[in-house]
Image (spheres, rainbow, N blue to C red):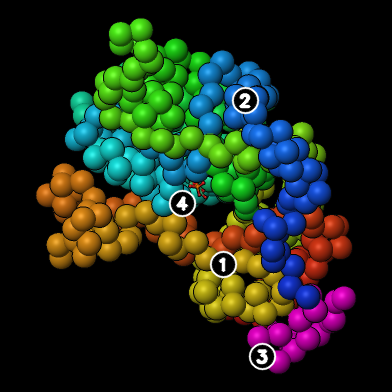
Amino acid sequence: MKGTTAQLAIDGGTPVFSEPIGQNLGVRKVGAEEAHAVAALIRDGVSGDPIGTFCKAFTQAHGVRHGVAVDSGTAAVHVGVVAAGVEPGDEVILPAISDVGSVKGILAHNAIPIFADVNLQTYNIDPVDVESKITDRTKAIVAVHLYGQPAPLDELMDIGRRHNVPIIEDCAQAHFAEYKGRRVGSIGDIGVFSFITGKHMTTITGGIVMTNNDAYAKRAELFSVGRGEEEGTKGGIFFRTHVGLGLNYRMNPLGAAVGMVQLDKLDDIVRRRRESGQLLDRLIRDIPGLSPPLIIDEARHAYWLYAVTMEEGAFAVDTYAFARALQAEGVSCMPKDYYLLYDHPAFLDPAPPRNPEYAFPRAVYDDRERYYKGMCPNAERGLATHIVITWSEFFTQEDVYGIEEALRKVADSYRA
Ligand SMILES: Cc1ncc(COP(=O)(O)O)c(C=O)c1O
């Protein structure tokens, strides 16, 4: 499978992997067992309560009392924000680096995203910057466990308690990651997950919102699957009353059936991703100029993506050229600049919104100075110095050694 030559594949050399690895991993995640569960459910006329069963199993796996299954992680963040009691015009603090799914729910609720800077070594939200950005309009803090590594929850929970602001854990990239021995999603006031195909486990598309707080749970349920309706009777006949805004974000029951099978595999999936990730952690240390993710003492990383940091000044090329060369060797990877949430026209473009019917909240447009390039310097510096490798439970030891070889080959060629 592997060739060896110092000439980079991008320059016409033989690639380390003759078949690129890291492709179609989401497709490979599901197969006969999931198909069987879905077929059985359809055969039975989609009877019973597959969504409730999945919710119960997932929340029990986290020791959390309430869960509402929804149809995406984006919806889960939206519901989490609503459940936390955020109202239009309120501020919600979140890290400057994340998937856009972390911010869309805040905007959908006409709340104002306030971006906090990140730690330059973990790329996770920096509690000191969070605290400096709290105002009397701050109504929630979203802690994203980026790439699979838990955010510093002790510090964030402490800030939340002192300022009376709930913490929403965005665990969309960190299934079964642990903080001080506890699974993420069970530590903050609210935990949200995505189950889109590329994640550690999937319901094909889907998400969940979990909480131990009865009031949050009630609000989450009413808003996300209860459509803002209360059920009763009128003249002895069933009757529904609209008591507030509510959507229909309900998870597809067929997805819930897939989720039950996947949940059974999740421990093993995360164990395998961790083992191979930790192998690369060890191997990469010997490559001058590159370093593995820095993992904080409290955390057990779940390795959704593998972040490789390029020491500043160590290479003659930027992250894009480095990633292109690595891709040519057959490694699926990329810089993550588009994860800088405010660095998009929707926030930085001073022109009126291109699609006013889909405009962000008025408050975001009315105060455009709020967002500017350079506002979170660590986030910008960190993104300029790391790339991420698509990670997978299907990687063998040989694959990991191949990734190391490719990294070494590219690093040696581009060393400054
Ligand atoms: C951190 C984070 N939050 C939220 C989401 C949104 O999830 P979904 O794609 O299921 O809407 C994602 C998606 O990948 C994510 O990575």
Magenta stretch secondary structure, dominant: loop
Location of mark 2 (residue):
49
**Distance between the alpha carbons at the discs numbered 3 and 2:** 56 Å
In front: 288, or 16? 16
| Left or right: 391, with 167 as reference point | right
**Distance between the alpha carbons at the discs numbered 1 and 4:** 14 Å
**Residue 14 location (% of width, % of height):** 78, 86
Whether ligand 1 has any atom under 8 Å from the Cβ at mark 4 is answered as yes
Q: Residues within 10 Å of mark 2 (few under 14, many from 20)?
A: few
- Give the residue type at disc 2: Asp
Seen from this angle, which residue lies furthest top? 236
- The residue lying at 40 percent from left, 56 percent from top is 340
**Residue 214 location (% of width, % of height):** 44, 12
- The residue lying at 21 percent from left, 34 percent from top is 88
- Give the residue type at disc 1: Met
- Examine the rendered structure and indicate whether residue 370 appears above or below residue 42: below
Disc 3, SS: helix
**Distance between the alpha carbons at the discs numbered 2 and 1:** 41 Å
Quadrant showing the N terminus = bottom right
Give the foreground label among 2 and 4: 2
Location of mark 3 (residue):
11
Ranked by sequence position, the earlier of labels 4 and 3 is 3
